[in-house]
Image: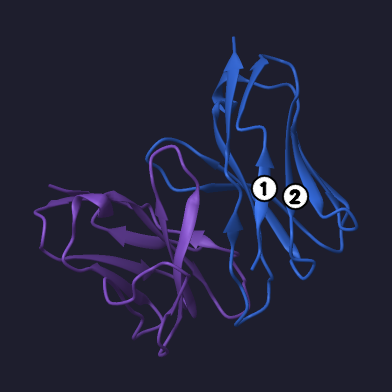
Chain colours: A purple, B blue
Amino acid sequence: GAVVSQHPSWVICKSGTSVKIECRSLDFQATTMFWYRQFPKQSLMLMATSNEGSKATYEQGVEKDKFLINHASLTLSTLTVTSAHPEDSSFYICSARDRQGSYGYTFGSGTRLTVV
Amino acid sequence: GENVEQHPSTLSVQEGDSAVIKCTYSDSASNYFPWYKQELGKRPQLIIDIRSNVGEKKDQRIAVTLNKTAKHFSLHITETQPEDSAVYFCAASISHFGNEKLTFGTGTRLTIIP
């Protein structure tokens, strides 16, 4: 079946630094990548959607300059949290889909980000 | 955009009894409705899904029903077991390239009482 590998699984960083999270589709072409954020005991909130080779589309209220998304290839997308602050501490999770939706929405394993 | 509401937020059920979780959606163009089970700190796990051309789907102890006219869909778990305890999310999307966007409900914490 389709697999999305997400790294790191957890990261602790200092305020003001940047953190990069990677998602790789291992056996299918991730034409579209979705990035979600999930606060404790809350739902998954879509942050942005990116199609390979195109600029990401951000949801209302999500700062595009703070959450940089790169989707330069059909197997790799990255989310960079720039100038991280404690309020950015959250569970970030990606979800990939190929053009035909052959495998539905395939989720990465998530990244627990803690900003101290 | 799509708005998905989910009820109840918490549900406690005696082991062996049935559990029902209900969701409503706002966008009549949505045509794909998955249900996910999420354990703490883990990725959402697809447990069942339904497309808009089907009214009901069943997979062993799990079933989903869809009422397109009323724009609501429900998850039914029968003969509940302790391992069914988790947070369940419904979701809705338009399953068409360039327009997919999976919107999640607020979640239901299901506790199975032994």
Q: Secondary structure at mark 1?
A: strand
Residue A91 appears in the rendering? yes
Q: Residues within 10 Å of mark 2 (few under 14, many from 20)?
A: many
**The quadrant where residue A94 appears:** bottom left
Q: Quadrant of the N terminus of chain B?
A: bottom right
Picture residue at 40% right of the left edge, 87% below the top: A55
In the image, A61 versus B82, the foreground residue is A61
**In the image, residue A14 above or below residue A104:** above
Picture residue at 67% right of the left edge, 32% below the top: B8
The residue identified by callout 2 is B24
**In the image, residue A50 above or below residue B77:** below
Q: Residues within 10 Å of mark 1 (few under 14, many from 20)?
A: some
Marks 1,2: beta carbons within 8 A: yes
The percent coordinates of residue A85 (x first, y second) are 18, 56
The residue identified by callout 1 is B5
Parent chain of label 1: B
The percent coordinates of residue B22 (x first, y second) are 74, 40
The amino acid type of the residue labelled 1 equals: Glu
Can marks 1 and 2 be said to lie on one chain?
yes
